[in-house]
Image: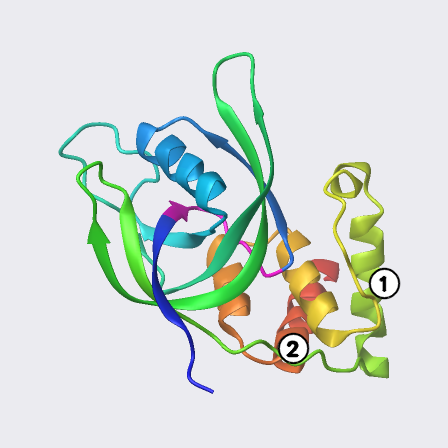
Amino acid sequence: MKSKRLEMPLFPLRTVLFPGGVLPLRIFEPRYTDMVGRCMREGIGFGVVLIRQGEDVLGHADAKLPEIFDVGTEARIIDFNQADNGLLGIVVEGARKFSVRQVRTQADRLMLGDVEFLADEPAGELAKEHEPLVEVLQELTSHPLIKKLNLQVNFSEARSVSLRLSELLPIEPEIKQSLLQMRWPRERLAELGRLVKKFQG
């Protein structure tokens, strides 16, 4: 089956969004409030991509747009609120992973990506060697702040465990990006096993 390709608004951040993950965002730049309005009206998503170099906020009209990694995640708006200070708060959920083929910029400096959606990962089964990782994830998801996100976790599925652990571990965005770009849950779990061992000394 041929993968689907389309143009999608991009939101470059210093954060990685994973499929099935939940990310609260504060929106204040006009280009992004317009983007959110359009996404909500048309029932479409936007792409969250990690910044490789540069800033997420453009301080002035001539500010250079950031360089981005070319694999990101489609974000679907699942909740929104207007804060007292006038900022728009939204909560997004990660959907499909995509690869950015080309980028163009609107007049308001909103980045638009020509993206190709990547194949869904297989669910995969967990092995006995993954039990310590499941325990780490159970510990992380029991934290009161994480509970508030109301994450859906299937503790018996390799894909679910690998994605949620990648999302919740306190590691650098670039490492999270390399975990996002992996195509197979078992490959991601092997790398997570090495990372967790480093944490535990």
- Tell which circle, 2 or 1, labels the residue nearer the N-terminal end: 1
Residue at the image position 80 percent from the left and 65 percent from the top: 154
Total labels drawn: 2
Q: Which residue extends farthest top? A: 84
SS at badge 1 = helix
Q: Height in image: 96 above or below 139? A: below
Image coordinates for residue 139, horizontal then vertical, percent: 84, 53
The segment highlighted magenta reads 11-19
Q: Is residue 22 visible?
A: yes
Residue 185: give its label: 2
Residue at the image position 31 percent from the left and 34 percent from the top: 31
197 horizontally vs 71: left or right: right
Tell me the amino acid under the disc marked 2. Pro
Residue at the image position 80 percent from the left and 50 percent from the top: 141
Q: Height in image: 60 above or below 64? A: above
Image coordinates for residue 32, horizontal then vertical, percent: 37, 35
Query: Is mark 2 in CB contact (under 8 Å) with mark 1?
Result: no
Tell me the amino acid under the disc marked 1. Glu
191 horizontally vs 12: left or right: right
How many angstroms separate mark 2 from mark 1 (CA)?
17 Å
Taking the magenta stretch, the answer to whether it contains residue 15 is yes
SS at badge 2 = helix
Task: Give the label, 2 or 1, closer to the camera.
Answer: 2
Image coordinates for residue 12, horizontal then vertical, percent: 38, 47
| Residue on which disc 1 sits | 135
